[in-house]
Amino acid sequence: MQQFLIIAAAHFLALISPGPDFFLVARTSLAAGWRVASGACLGIAVANGVFIVAAFTGVSVLQQGSVPFITLQLVGCLYLLYLGVLFIRHAGSSVLQAPGDAAPGGRTSWLQAAGMGFLSGILNPKNALFYVSLASMLGAQSSAGWKAFYGIWMFAVVLGWDLLVALAIGNGRLLRSFQRALPMLERLSGLVLIALALGMLGMLMA
């Protein structure tokens, strides 16, 4: 139980720290409502699930320093740069409307949001390193049952937290309140994503 509390606390604290997944859910919820953003939430959770399963089963390609892992880090950094530039480039172009009031044309679909969420999660090198670190904390003595429990717990927490963010930001009244703040939020999100990618690239090249 003590081990579970430590790992669960570390996982949740890392989860609530603003990152690319958070900004993607926030922007999608602001632009298209929480129902569409729930697709991004599920995509992010599935991507996290891939890393959880890979880390907990000891997949060798996720070992830090291996060629596949470094390749994943580089591709992830490039994607974060792309996403950051995209946020800044289109800042202010989204019109906040309550879910159901916006015109269907030109809006992000649920499947598109799910795809963006999966890419955001699977191409984030921090996720791979983080789950490998948590898996190493469990040690080789943990049973398959406990590993499955940890995996299901983490998947559920990721999905639940992102849905909570989407619901809070996607509320109709909050949408109207955020109308003026959206361009600044998008520019700030883009700058944070670009800084994160550049920082990770600097670490890789050091």
Image: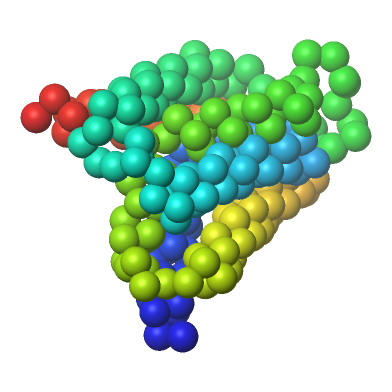
Figure quadrant of residue 196: top left
Tell me how many marks there are: 0
- Residue drawn at point x = 85 percent, y = 26 percent: 102
Nearer to me, 167 or 5: 5
Indicate whether 160 appears above or below 183.
Answer: below
Left or right relative to 19: residue 178? right
Image coordinates of residue 42 in percent, x first then y, are: 68, 43
Would you say residue 195 is visible in this rendering? no
Image quadrant containing the C terminus: top left
Image coordinates of residue 162 in percent, x first then y, are: 62, 51
- Residue drawn at point x = 24 percent, y = 33 percent: 66
Indicate whether 3 appears above or below 70.
Answer: below
Left or right relative to 131: residue 120? right
Image coordinates of residue 73 in percent, x first then y, are: 32, 29
- Residue drawn at point x = 46 percent, y = 37 percent: 20
- Residue drawn at point x = 61 percent, y = 62 percent: 152
Nearer to me, 83 or 47: 47
